[in-house]
Image: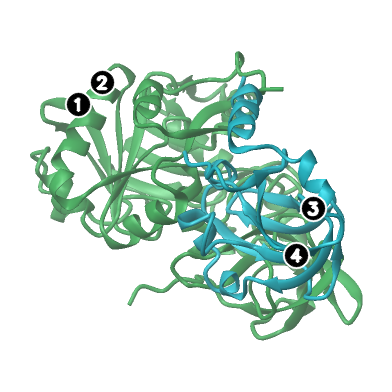
Amino acid sequence: MDFPKDLKYHKEHTWVKVEGNRALIGITDHAQEELGDIVYVELPERGSDSEQDESFGTVESAKAISELFAPISGRVVDINEDLADQPELINDDPYDSGWLVEIEMSDPSELDSLLTADTYKKYIEEEKG
Amino acid sequence: MPEQKSNLKRTPLYDIHKGLGAKMTTFAGWEMPLEYSGIIDEHLTVRRAVGLFDVSHLGKIEVTGPKALDAVQVATTNDASILSDGQVQYSLSCDTFGGIMDDVTLYRFSEDRFMFCVNAANREKIFNWLGENIGSIAEIRDKSSDLATLALQGPLAQQLLQKVCDAELSLIRYYRFVLNNINGIEAILSRTGYTGEEGFEIYVAAAAAETVWEMIMDAGKDVRIRPCGLGARDSLRLEMGYTLYGNDITEETTPLEACLERFVKFQKQSFIGKEALLTQAHEGIKKRLIGFEMVGRGIPRSHYPIHVEGRRIGEVTSGESSPSVGKFIGMGYVETQFSNPETKIEIEIRGKMVEAVVVKRPFYKKT
């Protein structure tokens, strides 16, 4: 399983890639693996606001509906429209073409509360028991 | 907290599933493989080539004795008297109110020996119910743990199976079975399934299950056979519009409501539930099982409300993103007046009304 070092991770299994005051958000390799084939994604509208730790959408696999929790607060400036017809991009390429939304951060200091690749990896190992 | 798993039952193939890296799930008290390579991949493999499922959780109950046929007739809605040896019949067992106790496949070995293949969740219930209702005229035996069941499904199933058995498979017609062997190991080969594809269900002694699984997987190597789990089993059956006990049919639904009336033979002698079903047929059926396709976007899920013009008229019982049809599809019960194909309905998906339309089943048609 892959956890790129240049990303920050949220305990609800989303990642953040910071570019200036903007951040790309997606779900982790671990999350897509646990979910299995993703068949539907519901994302927020462009221009809507999301709050750190709050739900901003859902991903659905054959068996389960999972809430997406925002790793960081801000305004949604872009969404990945390819996912409407190709939700499998999240399985195939969770850190690149399977990204979910782009957010303009309202409080970049929230980034400090996120995990590094190493601590996230440890966290999921502990979660598994 | 990890789920407490100590009380779960395991099939004789459990170690094989773990060895293949299957993601396991809990189903009807069993720890079963949900998926191996992925539900969509397994689903498409069965549609295009061939897949192997472990369905050993299904219950197998034998009814024997000189009056076995009479006993079976009392306990099922279809007419078992038309069966000959080596024939299988889809049938239903109903309670006195006409509610569906289980849907079963009934095997006739001989005039005095039948076998019910029942849903895993209903095994104990049906075994006890058969005992109470027909135990005085026939012997009822639970053979479930003696026999393992593999389902080999897909267009290449026959050519593959032919490599490991000496029965002439092309002579076995749909819903027929033979007593034969897999490389010398005794087996029942039944041309039945739950996927809409050609294929066989294979019953072998539990002790031989691992060997037979490996033989079939080995024989299927060159056609890239895949092990398949309950996830693909469910997505395949739903594309065909087949009902799943516990979702689409329960004790709260009758065969008439579930559009299974062709498996109810009122002209045969008395059977349990006959009077109630006749009454329902005369008084009118208030709800019907429909198939529907989403027009708007969203996956319909079990228990989501169905509306017409702001009024709740029913409930979803099964739904999915269909891998072969490429649409969001579902089944559910609605008031009978809304059950005709092309009727516009709305599915309430987490508070949002999403357009859908009633369609004929099956959703998937082989081209």
**Tag 4 secondary structure:** strand
Subunit of label 3: A
Give me the chain that's green. Answer: B
Residue type highlighted by circle 1? Glu
Find out whether the residues at labels 2 and 3 contact each other: C-beta distance under 8 Å: no
Tell me, yes or no, whether the two marked residues, 2 and 1, touch with CB atoms within 8 Å: yes
State yes or no: discs 4 and 3 in contact (Cβ < 8 Å). yes
Q: What subunit carries mark 2?
A: B
Helix, strand or loop status at disc 2: helix
Q: Which residue position is annotated with label 2?
A: B208
Q: Nearer the viewer, residue A67 or B259?
A: A67
Give the residue at mark 4.
A103
Please name the residue that numbered disc 3 is placed on. A72
Q: Amino acid at mark 4?
A: Ile
Q: Amino acid at mark 2?
A: Ala
Question: Which badge, 4 or 3, comes first in the chain's sequence?
Answer: 3
